[in-house]
Image (cartoon, rainbow, N blue to C red):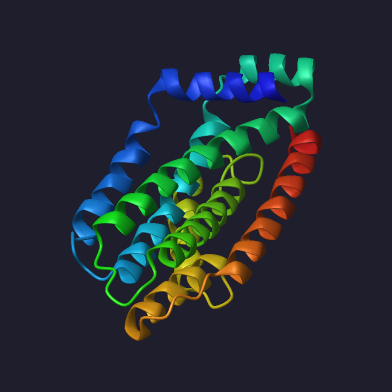
Amino acid sequence: MTALLRYQSGLLLRSQRWLAPLLLYATFIGVGVQVGEPVLGALGLTAAALVPVSAWSVRICLTQEPPAARSVVAAAAGRGRAHLAALLTGAGWPVLVGAVAVLGVTVTGDRSGVDPLAALRAGLLAALACALTGAVVGALASRPFVRAPGWSLAALVLGSLLALVTTGSPAKHATTALVTGARTAEVGPPWLACGGALLLAAATAVLSCRATARLE
């Protein structure tokens, strides 16, 4: 699996397709988060912006290989394992970028009446929950479930929006916890949302890998 992850990461870096979602995330943060604003609200926005970014990143990794190269890798390592490596690569870097953004927002935000370490912990958990929720959207909006590029993009946008506004979504639960905490100055780490996102992402990865092995 390590070799597959290196292969997928190398493809992503050389293609420079990661630039577009990274710039989208930087735009969200630059426009929506101001230096000195209440830290919990800023962390909520920082985490929420990871949903479409992570979904886009996963879709990029699932579609970046030419068909011939994908067939060779599948023959050598197994189609399910190759698909899982693409999923992990697509979901991994948004988590890292989100963690850096959460740290920066925590340092520059207004922490009046809020424990900085508690805010940082809550922000990291919310970022992880949102990144994993976005990864689920990206996996379901890409091959092998949706092959047509136009429909895939439409499903990606709609799925990201629903993930942020639908009751029961881990991303909505995590961001709501931070926004509510900004009003009350109480930090409630979104453990439940993070755990739900992990379970949802794991189930989606299993489903996606099995579907790939059968349909492709």
Q: Quadrant of the C terminus?
A: top right
User: How far across and down, in percent of the image, does residue 113 sit?
Assistant: 31, 77
Residue 123 place in picture, x, y as percent:
44, 61
Residue at image x 79%, y 41%?
Answer: 210
Q: How far from the left and from the top, in percent, is residue 121?
A: 49, 61
Residue 11 x %, y %: 51, 20
Would residue 6 appear left or right of 44 to someone viewing this image? right
Residue at the (42%, 73%) spot, across then down:
178
- Which of the 4 quarters of the picture holds residue 89? top right
**Residue sticking out furthest to the bottom:** 184
Task: Name the one closer to the observer, 162 or 171.
Answer: 171
Q: In the image shown, does 95 or 83 lie closer to the viewer?
A: 95
Q: Is residue 73 above or below residue 202?
A: above
Q: Residue at x 57, y 43 (%)?
A: 142
| Relative vertical location of residue 170 with respect to residue 187 in this rendering, above or below | above
Residue at 66% in and 40% down: 144
